Image: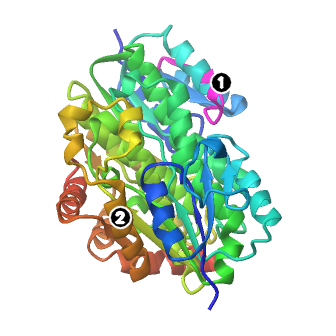
Amino acid sequence: MNKHCVITGAADGIGRALALRFGAAGYGITGVDVDEARAAQTQAELQRAGAEARFIIADLGQQAGVEHAAGELAQLPLIDVLVHNAGISAVGRFGALDLARQQAVLHLNLGAPLLLSAALLRQERMGRGGSLVFLASLSCFTGYPGAASYAASKDGLAAYARSLAAARRDLHVLTVYPGPTRTAHARRYSPDNRRESRRMPPEQLANAIAHAVQRRQRLLIPGAGNQLFALLGHLAPRLTEWAMRKTVLEKV
Amino acid sequence: MNAPTILISGASDGIGLALARHYAATGARLLLLGRRPASGLGESFFTATSYCRVDLAQPYAHAIVKRFLLHQGIERLDLLIHNAGLGYYGPLEQQPAATINDMLAVNVHAPIALTHALLPLVERTHGSVVFISSIAANLPVPQYAVYGASKAALDGFARSLRVELAGRARVQVIHPGATRTAMHARSGAPLEKLGWSRFPPPERVARAIARAIASGRDETTIGLGNRMLRWAGRQLEWLGY
């Protein structure tokens, strides 16, 4: 029987690249996404490539959406790889940025993975030695002035993954800290898209994640430039905060 | 000089109550948030003009607080101390969705929403927004997974906000370790096993917090042992543990 990979936010961007990558590796793919039209496109694309694919349409930013997704997943085969990828951002000065939008960021990026993980673990939906993958952000190491609520959501997610790894030695937990990625998401939220070509292609990121899952790595900072920036953030946090201030905050 | 105006959330118990006692003794104008009815609070500084009864798990709590301050004619805040917090002890798969939601609402959403609502008042005094976090934010805490995540989220928020507000207001984060408060009992933790009786009392921790706030430092961890733990936790994180 095929291994089963569940990816949230799989209709587009990094999630879609992950679906195609794991699909090509022989996994059956279950995507969870709120965008029905894009989900249908990605599902067709996966099927054309020979992968077994289905989508659950749910808004994980809402409690009811998480419950719906968990209920549907309970009817499907046990999960070998669960990727918490769905995420949104909100960029701007904290005081000027709409509070409801910032709360939506926290609900989807932090609340949803915590609720969904708890629900699936409670129902024992993870296969033996299965992998839980959390997409945090390079901002966990560097700070992210101009996206304070986003930074909060990703720091919280990485901390949760860490405790989960300590709590469940029978499972594999991987935390990914991607830097800028060449997706529509990044284009939408970045204050400056002139150097878009320097962002990592989502296919490259998906490939790195698939390898890290295979090797059962605990931590992945994809790309040498990102690794250097993360190390700088660890050793000289003021320096990376200043750099983020220049590249993000002063442009919003 | 006028007495400073200080808002403390979670002021009816634990570290928040100890902080309120500390600042009341200095003659500060206090604004205190808590869930308990005012009638059950013994201290004389809980009055109709200082105490706002509000459940921070409710989505519009920040609007209630803002209206309360407006009614009291408060236009400036020197200190906005986000102290209220919920705990939960136990395997993360057993934590019910409702308590995950409440914990995120009180520990993460409420301080962010309150800061959003009250930031102009703090900026008016070039005051300080203070987050009472926890060393659990920087450690793997299998029995406190959501709690640790909520405090780490707060730290990440504060770190980025500090850069944004530089020159207009301070953002300070305090990391206490385990403290002898009712939060632990309510969280379901096995108090005896954890050595609850050896935890420092909230009064001592509150004094250390007040000193840390007065020092103007961005981040303070309370207690030498906690400082060492947190340092180790941060190095281990880098290694993926």
Q: Position of residue B220 (x, y in %)?
A: 33, 70
- Residue type pointed to by label 1: Ala
- Residue type pointed to by label 2: Asn
- Return the disc, 1 or 2, that comes first in the chain's sequence: 1
Q: Is residue A63 magenta?
A: yes
Looking at the image, can residue A182 be seen? Answer: no
Q: Which residue matches tag 1? A: A64
Front: mark 1 or 2: 1
Residue under the point 69% across and 43% down: B59
Task: Please say if A230 is above or below B90.
Answer: below
Task: Please say if A237 is above or below A141.
Answer: below
In this picture, residue B153 sits left or right of residue B231? right
Judged from the image, the secondary structure of the residue bearing numbered disc 2 is: helix
Q: Chain of mark 1?
A: A
Residue stretch in magenta: A51-64
Q: Which residue matches tag 2? A: A226
Q: Chain of mark 2?
A: A
The image quarter containing residue A83 is: top left
In this picture, residue A96 sits left or right of residue B232? right
Q: Position of residue B232 (x, y in %)?
A: 18, 58
